[in-house]
Image: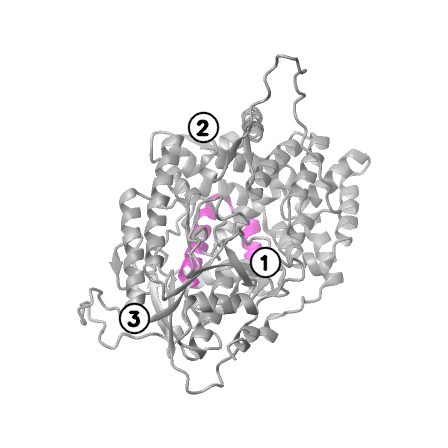
Amino acid sequence: MIRFQKTAALSRLSIGLAAIALAAVVGCGYGDGYPVKTAPEVVEVPAAPAAPATPDAPPPPAKIKITSLDELPVHTYPLEGTLTEMLNNPEVMSTLRNAYRKDIESDLARYQIDDVATLQGKYRSLYTIALAEKRYPDARVLLNRIRSMEDKESTRLMTGLVSEARIRAQMGGGDTDQKFRQELTAAVNELPWDVVQDAVKSGKGRAEFLSEGFVMGMVQSQMEPAAQAAGELNADLAGGLISMRYAIDEVLPLNPVVAEVYGEYIAANDRVKENIWPARDLDLGKRAGLKPVVLGIWDSGVDAESFPHQMWTNPNEKVDGKDTDGNGWIDDVHGIAFDLDGRANSYLLHPLGDQAGKLDSAFEYMQGFQDLLSAIDSPEASAMNKRLSEMQADEVGDLMTTLSFGGLYAHGTHVAGIAMEGNPFARALVARITFDYHQTPQAMTMETAQRLARDYVATAKYFRENGVRAVNMSWGWSYTEILGSLEANGVGQSAEERSKMAREMINVLSDGLKQAMIDSPGILFVSAAGNDDNDVEFDVVIPSSFDLPNLMIIGAVDQAGEPTSFTSGGRNVRVYANGFQVESEVPHGRTMKMSGTSMASPNVCNLAGKLFTLKPSLTPAEVVSLIEQGATPAEADANLLLIHPKKTAELLK
């Protein structure tokens, strides 16, 4: 499930390439996505000197403990013209940086924030500002603090090298460009290839395609509408604008050298990581006499023609525009569907709408983008690289919309293929939900939230009535996402009002979705943790934050069983599965490799389906127990349990 973009509905789906693009730019500003040279020491962030103590002075006030993201104060900043005008005005950007920095420092001083991802985000923002203002000693202290909080080795090793190499080059005097290349090369060559290869390849891809035109296009198509609608900048927009300015000034000029150095490192070390998953695979294809098992694919829609022999079929229904069997659903031959407003319809695959005629291009763009970020030398990657590097700002929005639609259109089919792989007895029952792929997403309303909550209860009832044993859910909602939709459309009179509305709406959605699962104790729900590298409870993400006996939350690792940089976590994440470059079907006879916890989740649903196939009498609780018992600790982190389908199946004996 991809929740890597805060203001677009595609953040709920795990292949939102437009979101990856924006994250790539912002990541450059924050220092993410680049290697560091050494393991960090724990260094405190510099603070203002304390006032001298006096006998009568009261003790400093205790920090206010924060348990969820929406408890933090809402900060806003003046909108002075367009974002492009603000970006090009040094005085305005300086004022914005100062105000933004003071608000972050105030939050850190007043509030006890235990969520690591939130703290890292604040320190990254301070780090970007320090770099932009050339306060290099402060930047180094902040970078060490960021590193010290990172528990994923690859991410820790891929944070801050480019900026740090630049600092050393600038402070060394002489030919700065040559020194930067030398510093970067030396640091990269010290990296452990087996740990960082995927991230280095992704970094090379970003360095090759990012251009000022692309950056400005992202500002104009994704950030500007939200700012103009709200009439002010929220903290996310302010931080993004600061990061974009830094990227244009400091990151983009370095990218040609970064791409070359990374490319040389890849060429010297390139060897494929060991893939642990084939040896763990459980294939029921050669077994006979087993009964079909129905799996619910609760997602963005499934192309039934991609699975001609594995679709659940309602024998009493036919496609005639009527409720033939009288069950309350029209044309539900292979399942049910809901539109963007939560109203039932019969389109199990998302209608093309305003993207008619663009589907082939969308798939080509998606493949090219995936290959670029994986350093795969393919015709699609070359074409995409050329297109992105030459793109004018006013062309970016349309490309991102088409990419987002392609992700939405393909997602459910890709998930279904993973969930049924190696199990000819699996039958997919489709429950399509709809998300907005446009750059300015439709605003959530209380009426829509209430309708969606009722849809969730009705969908679970449909699952129960038709014998579904396990359901995959590679999607979700978050408080931040709903807030973003309100901001993008200028809903509400103030930032505080929007925050309250978003909290009320996420509560309505949460209550409906949780009730749907509680009403279905005989069904195992399997959900992706999300792709924000965050704690799903602190960020108020549903269903990932639920704690229910018939729900499993899944994190993502790569082909070697090492944690991906994007996977979210939290105490509710039960096991981890392969979520990196997983190949599966997409509509109209194609296949594609995709990455995300959206791909990890159906791998676990696949295992659950096979267990129900082998022993139909199993309960959801028993399946959860079997999956956890058969899982093995990851080498990099014994707390991460990696699914092992073969071992799990052996426990049935």
Q: Does any portion of residue 341 appear in the rendered image?
A: no
Residue that carries the numbered disc 3 in the rendered image:
466
Q: Going by the image, does 419 lie left or right of 32?
A: left
Q: Find out whether the residues at labels 3 and 2 contact each other: C-beta distance under 8 Å.
A: no
Vertical order, 515 against 164 (above or below)? below
The amino acid beneath tag 3 is: Asn
| Above or below: residue 435 compared with residue 236 | below
Q: What residue range appears in magenta? A: 384-411
| Kind of residue at disc 2 | Gly
Using residue 408 as the reference point, say whether residue 273 is left or right of it: right
Residue 111 screen position, x and y as percent = 54, 31
Near mark 2 (Cα within 10 A), the count class, few <14, some 14-19 or many ≥20, is: few
Q: Residue at x 52, y 59 (%)?
A: 574
List x then y, in percent, for residue 212. Answer: 57, 42
Which type of secondary structure does the marked residue at label 3 adopt? loop
Is residue 397 magenta-colored? yes
Task: Give the amino acid at mark 1.
Answer: Leu
Q: Are marks 1 and 3 in contact (CB under 8 Å)?
A: no
Question: Can you identify the residue that label 1 sits on?
Answer: 372
Please give the name of the residue rendered at 48% of the width and 62% of the height, measured from the top-left corner: 601
Q: Which residue is mark 2?
A: 81
Q: Earlier in the sequence, mark 3 or mark 2?
A: 2
Cα–Cα gap, marks 2 and 1: 35 Å
